[in-house]
Image: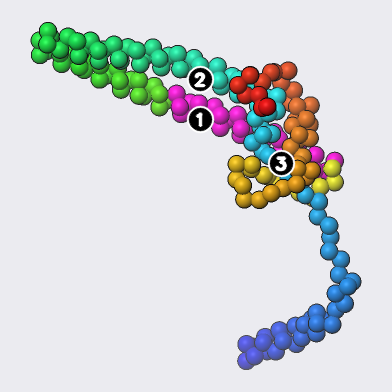
Amino acid sequence: MKQLLLATLVVTLTLPVTGMAQTADLTSVHTPTIKIGWMDAEQAVLTCDEGIRAINDIQKFIDTKNNDRDVMLRDAEDLRAKLEVQASKLTDEAYMDLEEKAHIAEIKLQRFIEDTQNDITSRRNRMVSSISAKMGPIIENVAIDKGLDAILIYSPSQRDAWVNPALFVTDDIIKAYNQVYPAGAPTIPAAAKKP
């Protein structure tokens, strides 16, 4: 009984709405205009002053670690070469001892490479996360200043769509970010400069 009453009530309430929808004047419907801007988030993070400085710091870290890796690699290669050259002259015990030293040097080198790569990845992720978090309010302010309803992320590496370059606000976001978070006047290394 309750189900019948409920069904009757639903039908009674929806019929007038359905009839109105069918007789509504479609010319009086106003579709709002939505203004959208696009930004390349990767470009914004990597080319703002703070991003450039952080990338330079990470590159210095990488260069130092590469030098350390080269020393460790030479040491491991020297032990292997010594083992090959002196193999016939060494006692079994001395051979096994040198073999173990070479193996340990190679394992240390491999671990060093893995640890260094993890450290580099972590530093990059922290940099991107830190700048992205601070960039959120900047993006909002640029949207408000330009009268935009939304700023969407565009990734040039994904060629799924084309966006009119006039709709990009990435440079405006970078400029506003640099004003709020100045990082001095770092220069882009020659290798990182775009033509």
User: In this figure, which residue is indicated by the disc labeled 1?
Assistant: 121
Name the quadrant containing residue 2: bottom right
Tell me: 125 left or right of 187. left
Q: Residue at x 80, y 39 (%)?
A: 142
Q: CA distance from mark 3 to mark 2?
A: 29 Å
Mark closer to the chain start, 1 or 3: 3
Q: What residue span does the magenta drawing correspond to?
A: 116-145
Task: Please indicate, yes or no, whether residue 151 appears anywhere in the rendered image.
Answer: no
Q: Are marks 1 and 3 in contact (CB under 8 Å)?
A: no
User: In this figure, which residue is indicated by the disc labeled 3?
Assistant: 39
Q: Position of residue 38 (x, y in %)?
A: 73, 44
Mark closer to the chain start, 3 or 2: 3
Query: Camera-side residue: 121 or 78?
Result: 78
**Secondary element at tag 2:** helix
- Tell whether position 122 is magenta: yes
Question: Going by the picture, which residue comes out furthest to the front?
Answer: 195
Task: Please indicate, yes or no, whether residue 23 appears anywhere in the rendered image.
Answer: yes
Name the quadrant containing residue 100: top left
Q: Amino acid at mark 3?
A: Met
Front tag of 1 and 3: 3
Q: Amino acid at mark 1?
A: Thr
User: In this figure, which residue is indicated by the disc labeled 2?
Assistant: 62
Q: Position of residue 177 (x, y in %)?
A: 75, 30
Around disc 1, counting alpha carbons within 10 Å, would you say few (fewer than 14), some (14 to 19), or many (20 or more)?
few
Q: Residue at x 20, y 17 (%)?
A: 99
Q: Which mark is residue 37?
A: none
Quadrant containing the C terminus is top right
Q: Position of residue 187 (x, y in %)?
A: 69, 18
Tell me: 141 left or right of 48. right
Q: Are marks 2 and 1 in contact (CB under 8 Å)?
A: no
